[in-house]
Image (tube, rainbow, N blue to C red):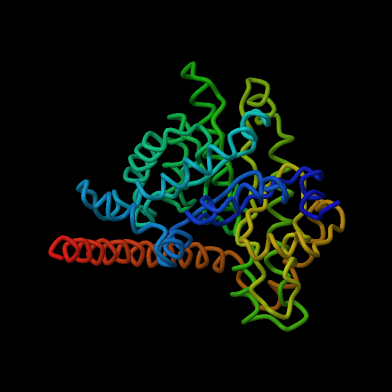
Amino acid sequence: MKATRQLHELGQSLWLDNITRTLLDDGTLARYIAEDSVTGLTSNPSIFDAAIGDGDAYDAGIHAKTLAGLAGEKLFVALALEDLRRAADLFRPIFDASDHVDGWVSMEVSPLLAADTAGSIAAAKQIFAQAQRENLFVKIPGTPEGIPAIEEAIFLGIPINVTLLFSCDQYLAAAEAYLRGIERRIEAGLAPRVGSVASLFISRWDVAGNKQLPDALHNKLGIAVGQQTYRAYRKLLASPRWQKLSAAGALPQRLLWASTGTKDPSSPDTLYVSALAAPDTIDTMPEKTLHAFADHGELHGPLADDGAEAEAMLARIAEAGVDLDAMASTLQDEGADAFVKSWKQLLQRIADKASALDRKAQGSIRL
């Protein structure tokens, strides 16, 4: 059995951390669904920046939307949602068959709103309404200002992918926001079924931690944080509070492993996928990692949920001088800053393309 199928049989969803118009046009995404057990998809500003910057697949759409009077963020959102609607439709059979647990795609609010609660809520409402797809998550970062926006969005019935989580504490804050949102819906007499995932970033821990740690502890930190968070996730699902919501019909906010591509060339290219195989979770992976795991990935059994190994490893890492709380905060801030940089670059790239395409069209008219 193919390794990707083994993960699926274990109870973990495989999502693609990428989207391009070419993937949709040439049938590649459909093939991933059929052959590699891919059951969902995530996107972010960096992914769209690369997609739009590579080649001319988006040129016609940019030009048409420019002529229609769109520019800047509105043009990008319209362009991105065209792709995400198509992807959502490909995943719709999975969404229906899984009773809305799986088969999702994701679209991020502007990274400029990471510290703007009210702005994030307004953007989430606009994106979800404009998308017109039940199986589309709006991504809101789990920053201090993002947490109340997540709660309010869930209360409003907007499915949310909580992004940029790095620590167990940050995950628990996101989970608490989700629980409060659902509890408020029940109190208001609203249906409790609102989808959500909480995305914990893994490999960036090791990119940062390896600089401070001896070789024996390299590439151990991200997995240990994942193990620690998985224990908290299983504990939450077993709690009376969640069991009450589940009995009322609420969907679990599933734990999602993000940033699972190996950054260290000296480590196995399937390192994080193999280590974090766990039921009732999601692994969203870049194409390179998906191909690697499909080709030569190995499973070593499901992730232990007692967290004992994680606590021992995190204690060793702390003793080696790493301040885990400070690093988690720094990683979240740096992640938000990186998305802002990609966002600004993306909007500039679209503006430049729009101008170039307009000049080309004007030149053709004169000829």
* Res. 210 image quadrant: bottom right
Compare residues 81 and 219 and report the one nearer the observer. Answer: 81
**What residue is drawn where x is 54% and y is 27%?**
183
Residue 175 position in % (x across, y down): 58, 42
**What residue is drawn where x is 59% and y is 39%?**
91
Which residue lies most toward the left here? 366
Which residue lies most toward the front here? 367
Residue 358 position in % (x across, y down): 21, 61
Compare residues 176 and 198 and report the one nearer the observer. Answer: 198
* Res. 323 image quadrant: bottom right
Q: Is residue 230 left or right of residue 245?
A: right
Q: How many marks?
A: 0
Relative to 151, does residue 347 appear above or below in the rendering?
A: below
Relative to 318, does residue 157 appear above or below in the rendering?
A: above
Which residue lies most toward the top here? 189
**What residue is drawn where x is 27% and y is 49%?**
65
Residue 123 position in % (x across, y down): 35, 43
Q: Is residue 216 left or right of residue 129?
A: right
Q: Quadrant of the C terminus?
A: bottom left
Q: Is residue 74 left or right of residue 313?
A: left
Residue 92 position in % (x across, y down): 58, 34
